[in-house]
Image (tube, coloured by chain):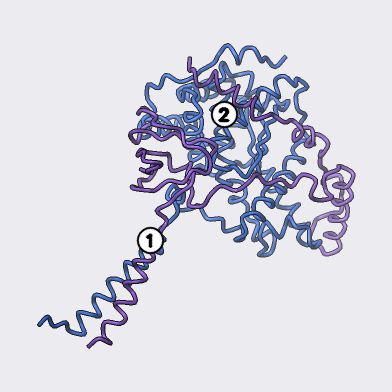
Chain colours: A blue, B purple
Amino acid sequence: MFQVSKLTVSKLTALIASLFLFQCASVPPEDDFRARWSDSLLGSNVQANTEAEIKFGREVAARMLVDVDGVENFELQKYVNTLGKYLAQYSARPELEFYFWVIESDTINAYAMPGGYIFLTTSAYRLMENEAELAGVLAHEIAHVKQKHIVNALDIKTVGAGATLTQLTSGASDAFRIAMDQAADQAIQLLTDEGLNQSDEFEADEIGLTIMVQAGYAPDEYLAYLKRVSASKATQQKELSHTHPSFATRLERLEAVKVSYGMENLNYAILEERFKQHPLE
Amino acid sequence: MARQWLPLITLSIFVLLAAGARAELAYVNSNKAPLFSAKSFSSDTIVVLLKGAEVNVLTRESRWLEVESNGQRGWVSVLLLKATPPGDTVSVIGSDQVELEGNARMRASAVATAGATRGLVESNDTNAMSFDFAELQQVENFTISVQEINQFGVLVNEGE
């Protein structure tokens, strides 16, 4: 007769318990990408979090628009908006409506604010040669929004005395409203002066590249644009250099991303002609 | 004797239930998600899965998931799938009273004053807090239809 000791039963129980815990600890698909991906600043209510993210993004965008103006070329604004929304289909943030706006500025840069508000400077647009390059830049900014880089970078818990972004944007008290304004100030500073940390920029490059490729654009054109920016006048690229890692490092990493994703020699869209049909002036 | 098996049997049931309920399912959270024949953008596209499509996850890698959907098996970028179905588009426009520039300035003024009273801000200079919600509304009013976006994509998908 088969005899099982109490010790064997205990071991089997422990083994199965471990298996149970292992299964419970399984992560959802996208969380594999970056372990840092915690919405620690946000609460557990997805709808409320998204609303808070959009409200905060609106505040930041409205402040940015005090110092800059959109170009009065609405054919161009429509073209950039259409391309941006076309790319955003591959962002995996279907709950967000993305907005794109070309702003007058002599610095080469683009800005991604929480909730889907993305601005591109006229100087950045002038330096582009085709639609794929524009797609690459917009996809990079969409990736920042997708990953909530600005929200994660802000020390809202310090500013808001332990409050979540949802509480700050609720406007439920003077203290929350003050904290919200301070957080918006910090966001503007990050966007225009300090920049995000290098790992966020690399992540946005990688995700942006996958967005543009899945949308059908040639990834090499984004790299070509970065090379052109790095070779442009030092005064013009001053701001971009300040808020981003070195171009040499980014290009090196992007080449590695291309290989790891199998993006070499893709005969994808460049669309120089359509881009040229939408000049700034 | 039978009593000593009780914890083991109970746990086994939990494990089997957990295995059944485990996140083997994933959902397309982008409008479109190409299903590739291999974990490479250079491989053939088997089909383009649409937003909300449910897939069975077969293999997980850092950047790719091997999935099965409607009898078709292939690889999808991990960035396009989530463990939960996609939600509807969220909008806060028009949901609060802080949209108009005038209201925003009033609010900023109230905030600065309240903050100054509490010693939380350096001054009650309201000029330092301003918003251009009028232009923001212009940005938000710039709507593009789904048809226009689809039409825009036709040329892209033809390549060049």
Residue linked to disc 2? A137
Q: Quadrant of the C terminus of chain A?
A: top right
Identify the image quadrant of residue B16. bottom left
Label 1 with label 2: CB-CB less than 8 Å: no
Q: What residue type is labelled 1?
A: Gly
Query: Image check: B94 left or right of A142?
Result: right
Q: What residue type is labelled 2?
A: Val
Q: Furthest residue to the left?
A: A1
**Secondary element at image label 1:** helix
Give the foreground label among 1 and 2: 1
- The image position of residue B77, as x and y in percent, is 43, 39
Total number of numbered labels?
2
Question: Which circle marks residue A53 in the picture?
Answer: none
Identify the image quadrant of residue B38. top left
| Image height of B128 relative to B149, above or below | below
Query: Image check: A26 left or right of B108?
Result: left
Residue linked to disc 1? B20
**Secondary element at image label 2:** helix
Few, some or many residues within 10 Å of mark 1 (<14, 14–19, 20+) = few
| Image height of B16 relative to A206, above or below | below
Few, some or many residues within 10 Å of mark 2 (<14, 14–19, 20+) = many
- The image position of residue A187, as x and y in percent, is 67, 46
Q: Please, which chain is the residue tagged with disc 2 on? A: A
Pick the residue in front: A156 or B68. B68
Identified at 25% across, 80% down, the residue is: A10
CA distance separating discs 1 and 2: 42 Å
Identified at 35% across, 28% down, the residue is: B43
